[in-house]
Image (cartoon, coloured by chain):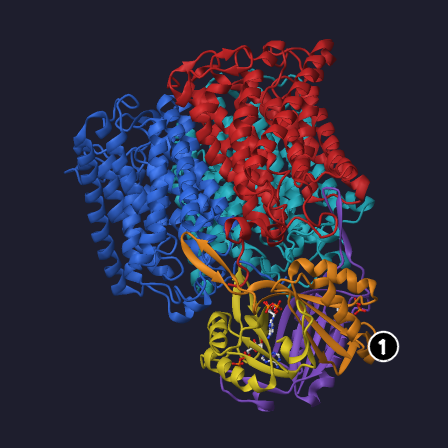
Chain colours: A yellow, B orange, C purple, D blue, E red, F cyan
Amino acid sequence: MKKIEAIIRPGKLDNVKDALGSNGVNGLTVTQVIGCGKQKGNTQVYRGVEYTIHLIPKVKIEVVVIDSDVDKVIEVITQVARTGEIGDGKIFVSSVDNVYTIRTGASGEQAL
Amino acid sequence: MKKIEAIIRPGKLDNVKDALGSNGVNGLTVTQVIGCGKQKGNTQVYRGVEYTIHLIPKVKIEVVVIDSDVDKVIEVITQVARTGEIGDGKIFVSSVDNVYTIRTGASGEQAL
Amino acid sequence: MKKIEAIIRPGKLDNVKDALGSNGVNGLTVTQVIGCGKQKGNTQVYRGVEYTIHLIPKVKIEVVVIDSDVDKVIEVITQVARTGEIGDGKIFVSSVDNVYTIRTGASGEQAL
Amino acid sequence: MDTGDTAFILVSSAMVLLMTPGLALFYGGMVRKKNVLGTFMHSWIAIGLISLQWILIGFTLAFGTDQHGLIGGLDWLGLNGVGMDPNADYAATIPAIVFMAFQMMFAVITPALISGSIAERMRFPAFILFMLLWATFVYDPVAHWVWGIGGFLRNMGALDFAGGNVVHISSGYSALVAALVLGKRKGLGKESMAPHHLPMTVLGAGLLWFGWFGFNAGSALGANGLAGMVFVNTNTAAAAAAIAWAFVERIHRGKTTMLGVASGAISGLVAITPACGFVTPLSSIFIGLVGGLVCYIAISVMKAKFGYDDALDAFGCHGIGGTWGALATGIFATKTINSAGADGLLYGNVSQLGIQATSVLVTVVFAVVATIVILKVIGLFTKLRVSEEQEANGLDLSLHGETAYSEFI
Amino acid sequence: MDTGDTAFILVSSAMVLLMTPGLALFYGGMVRKKNVLGTFMHSWIAIGLISLQWILIGFTLAFGTDQHGLIGGLDWLGLNGVGMDPNADYAATIPAIVFMAFQMMFAVITPALISGSIAERMRFPAFILFMLLWATFVYDPVAHWVWGIGGFLRNMGALDFAGGNVVHISSGYSALVAALVLGKRKGLGKESMAPHHLPMTVLGAGLLWFGWFGFNAGSALGANGLAGMVFVNTNTAAAAAAIAWAFVERIHRGKTTMLGVASGAISGLVAITPACGFVTPLSSIFIGLVGGLVCYIAISVMKAKFGYDDALDAFGCHGIGGTWGALATGIFATKTINSAGADGLLYGNVSQLGIQATSVLVTVVFAVVATIVILKVIGLFTKLRVSEEQEANGLDLSLHGETAYSEFI
Amino acid sequence: MDTGDTAFILVSSAMVLLMTPGLALFYGGMVRKKNVLGTFMHSWIAIGLISLQWILIGFTLAFGTDQHGLIGGLDWLGLNGVGMDPNADYAATIPAIVFMAFQMMFAVITPALISGSIAERMRFPAFILFMLLWATFVYDPVAHWVWGIGGFLRNMGALDFAGGNVVHISSGYSALVAALVLGKRKGLGKESMAPHHLPMTVLGAGLLWFGWFGFNAGSALGANGLAGMVFVNTNTAAAAAAIAWAFVERIHRGKTTMLGVASGAISGLVAITPACGFVTPLSSIFIGLVGGLVCYIAISVMKAKFGYDDALDAFGCHGIGGTWGALATGIFATKTINSAGADGLLYGNVSQLGIQATSVLVTVVFAVVATIVILKVIGLFTKLRVSEEQEANGLDLSLHGETAYSEFI
Ligand SMILES: Nc1ncnc2c1ncn2[C@@H]1O[C@H](COP(=O)(O)OP(=O)(O)O)[C@@H](O)[C@H]1O
Ligand SMILES: Nc1ncnc2c1ncn2[C@@H]1O[C@H](COP(=O)(O)OP(=O)(O)O)[C@@H](O)[C@H]1O
Ligand SMILES: Nc1ncnc2c1ncn2[C@@H]1O[C@H](COP(=O)(O)OP(=O)(O)O)[C@@H](O)[C@H]1O
């Protein structure tokens, strides 16, 4: 099983979730994050004092899927979350050793 | 070493933390998340406009432990966080290459 | 590629970000977390009722880098985030199978 | 001059001033996190600009010597001649300057009310221009028609105790027009636009309710029995409308919401505004109940049906509630409460309802046409609406360069 | 009729109205995030329902023609005969309708106070029924006994300037009963139930303090020297109690908290309420200091010891503080401040303390018994307490279908 | 005695009281999340302590029988002799106790204003001591000099209608000194110290604006034409300064911020405070515009240049704005508005500007010297500043053992 972590623009969350859902991927977990990279931050001025905010609000979506679903998920996210502007975000894929469903105690792929 | 990520109901956080503590697992990190899966969301109505909230508040607990502790931790979490209703959450186990304690600079298992 | 997750004191975030930046590491993602470990929590009293807050505010920094950068990143974080007091935090290193840049569709090391 | 009356109107003026920051909270809690300060700005900049507009030109346009029933003359330009002595034409027992101050607060909040419909998408320079033009070319004339000595609606016998036409109908229908001209928010119906901070909205509603006592009872222009009656009518209608909204929500959706109770209360306050100095407390119960009901229907059913994006329901609340209130005045008014008023339908005077309907119609048509013209004219000089990117990033950051909350410190 | 007095009571009424939304904030900040709106609702629905109950039936039950010292007659049903002329029996210089309005605001906030003890677990329909029955069968009679012409506690000579018995003792002990009947919140003592938003609570305390000037000084029913004295006593006791709480917290726990200062201020305001029109400012310091102290002990020590779950300390604050205030009135009252009052123990009149104690006892016994009966009767028709699942999910979502904050937008 | 005047001053006193919790919000929103309650505390403990200080000793020091023009005698210690009858020396138409109460609210808020400059780093015990000493040795004497019968600045002819010298200059320059003595916050210029909750700040500004009507118009000590004029001047200057700040921000930085509009409004309110009872509304526009401008420059340019850490701009706003206001009074004052005042420069009386400048100078020198002495003396007994660790963890947790928000419930 693989874990897919996608850091995307907050405004794209609903779309990505829906697109994944219509591709049969229903389980996911979302975290509010801030991040930086190529996208430059914005400058905020409070009473004349400038604060450059380098860390920009993003949303992290985590989906754990069986290996054969990885490509599909990545394609869906890449398509739906893309605007073409710097700051669209990254997807990280890593391996998961095991999964458990707390409610049933099931583990492995059937736990998903 | 392994990282155990458990997505649980927010109300179970205190119990899980205490149970882990009394099993000798004291280090953990908690994140506020929202998620979806089999559990259906709820509908909120604001001035007559319905919003179905698919993403439900959850809490993510991350614990990094030595390999031999993994089963114990999973058992504790599974027991304590279970209500038997849909939405109890998932546990993901993955491998960690190395751990460092910032304060001491120690690495590997003795860093935990 | 490796993912480096550092749990640090919130007050150290700006310093760590800047230090990484001046070492050429510009991409990172930050999450607000709470955690416990050796650091003991604090007691808060509300109208005479004591609540011991075991979970202390921390910040999690996630950086995905190519393998050869791992040591540098760990050194920078360890140096900058250290106060020497209990509660400085941990760094976890794990493997990442693949990385994608949503904007370009690039994958692998050139996606970073 | 009477010190008791003066004390009452001074304090009432302060209470009405507080309504505009209250409105900022009421509206601000209902928008998304990224638009809070932009929404606040609409109310706050109204306080700043209209306070100045009013003393320079607005007051004399509204209350200066009548010109053909349509507008006040320029005799009081820059408050020239508005002093510490009473002006018996309007309020014989309080200094003229206090009457002016009290009226100023009405002029301030009215354009701010409009901002509810165009929330989350209007450009700030366009909003400023709109407000200044609207205050001068819509509010000031309508105030003159209804309240100015010689104003043609006043002469016609239209009853509007504290601003049904002048404040709520004028702003409500203008808000609808502005929403239509600007178009819908991006993502409406697709993304969640749930209120980001309901306690803020409820706090705003509380301050509005408080201030409304100054607004309505202060309109008696003295601390007397009539002011007392108005006070009770105001509270009663607000309470009844809150209950009505809660009740119909329960029937229609299964649950009573806090936002519903607060919205209901505001609807009731709107509905009773024109009537409060002419009706009995028992009539106020009825006016409030129906007020809550019609606003609920307008906001929860009609808006969805017609599909306009009146973001925070400035039209649904003030336009609809104000219309009902103006008509209700023609039904429930009685001279036993206010001998300077008139009897309504229920008390045997059918014609009053006709007069009220006419005054509503006149106000609506004028507000609609004038708002269209004003927006078109502004559109010739500057864009009305923010860019897609600005809208996505939120007004706070893109227009004002600040964020309401800093989560990570 | 006096315009100055009328102005003062009109504004005071508005200020007391504002206390209930203020209470919503005060209480709402202390609950968990998931219960904010449910907690707000308790106060807001009180404004809606009791405003109507009062004009329809409550006012006449409390202030109508006396029936055997126990209750008012139905002469003023639906405000029949309550008009713009003064009723010299109660307030000779202000319109009767204004007196009615001022009293209404007291009737509104009192049941809302009770909601503090049953926070985070009572079903909404049960709460609505409770409030209506309690207002009618507890508040209205007690108000009559203490303040109505012919009321038996009034005739007995009990002193209660602004509502020690009527407002605080009646609600405080009823709150205790309600907490006991409903049982503890799930997880109490195990999970953290720390306040979710203390700035909200402190803001609420600020609005309460402000409104309390209307509450207490307005009870002089005129803008006169007595009102001034009451004003000063009110502020002084609140300040003293805030300092007392801060101080004892520092001794007992090592740190002075903001919540403590705010809680102390409210305790002092409660304690001075019955006494404020009868005592000197220096006595007020003492009443405030002791008020802060006894409430601190009740809330921080006694509650833990006895183990009842008075969630937001409605009993600890209003029951205990009100009792102290009523007794303190019997100790510190002096005719030099208010010739219509009486001298207390300190001024040589031992019997006044006895009278005060009796009036407390009567109020407590009646409130306790009546509350038990009301809750039992309601329990026959509908469940009082939410289900475990609803409690876990929070009242906002499970009862009202909304959430206070939307974090992710 | 006049009931109308009394009603007005009673309500004004309540409104001024509300300003201090309003200030807590205004300041609290601008600090970092970890220091909210610590910042609130500064204002709230001022209410508690100075309310008591004032009735015990402060009032008589400020307004008791003059001693050589420098201080009041102890005749009214503990309010001895301050009763329900008017004291014609100060206010012939309201009870002496009401005059005392009104003045109390000024004494309360003034030291709280100072807390803005030392936010996020002062120890709580040191702050308490500072406030008590400062109130007694700075505020009370200055109030006597300017407002007390026989006070030397009053005798000199200095005009200060509602507290330019007494409130804003005294607190503003003391705040600067305190900021310098305490030193900068750790991490200033390196870490982000952006405001954590701007809606809270804007709400605070709204309450301050509301309360300021009581502050300024109430200083007429009656509900009369002058009060009306003051009311209008107050609102006008606030509005003008808000617009000025918005405008200069737009020019200087490209964007108009909500925080800027709120800050501008407060600057205008400060600037008009000494002048409001002596100038025309048109002059108020000018005073406001310049007030907004000079405070903007002080806060956005000067502070950065000199590098002192006036955290929340207590000096930039009150010191600078108050100085401008005091001088402006010497320019724009006219006897046509207030025959008890004087004419200013513009009306041909050059000397008035000199008198105003002298009074500013005297107040500044005294405040600066006294504040240094007080802080040095306190420093002998206890540390002024929190430890590095406490500062890093935040005042809420380290000084008060509580946190403002609990995010995870
Ligand atoms: N190396 C990295 N490690 C962790 N997170 C990263 C990394 N690079 C980028 N991110 C995350 O992705 C977001 C978008 O990256 P950015 O470089 O700004 O734009 P783009 O992905 O379009 O090139 C960042 O805000 C950050 O949260
Ligand atoms: N495949 C998945 N990847 C990531 N998170 C998941 C996945 N499936 C479920 N979750 C998380 O677990 C939570 C509970 O899952 P759900 O399917 O609703 O109930 P249950 O675990 O009882 O079957 C979700 O809200 C989500 O946060
Ligand atoms: N085993 C662990 N798994 C996950 N997070 C941990 C673990 N141990 C510590 N942490 C995180 O690191 C933080 C600091 O750890 P702590 O033991 O208190 O101090 P130190 O790292 O200085 O020994 C904790 O608050 C927690 O968030």
| SS type, badge 1 | helix
Quadrant of the displayed image that contains ligand 3? bottom right
Q: Nearer the viewer, residue F362 or E163?
A: E163
Circle 1 residue = B110
Please identify the quarter of the rendering in which residue C109 is found. Answer: bottom right
Residue E91: % across, % down: 47, 15
Badge count? 1
Label 1: few (<14), some or many (≥20) within 10 Å?
Answer: few
Q: Height in image: B21 above or below E147?
A: below
Please identify the quarter of the rendering in which residue F172 is found. Answer: top right
Q: Residue furthest left?
A: D68
Is residue F403 toward the left or the right of residue D380 in the image? right
Q: Is residue D76 visible?
A: no
What kind of residue is marked 1? Answer: Gln
Is residue C26 toward the left or the right of residue D249 in the image? right
Is the C-beta of the residue carrying label 1 under 8 Å from the nearest atom of ligand 3? no
Q: Height in image: D275 above or below F376?
A: above
Is residue E330 toward the left or the right of residue E16 in the image? right
| Residue located at (66% from left, 17% from top) | E359
| Residue located at (78% from left, 77% from top) | B100
Q: Residue furthest right?
A: B110
Q: Nearer the viewer, residue D132 or D249?
A: D249
Q: Height in image: B14 above or below D318?
A: below
Residue B62: % across, % down: 71, 70
Q: Is residue F30 visible?
A: yes
Is residue D237 toward the left or the right of residue E335 in the image? left
Residue A92: % across, % down: 60, 82
| Residue located at (63% from left, 78% from top) | A110
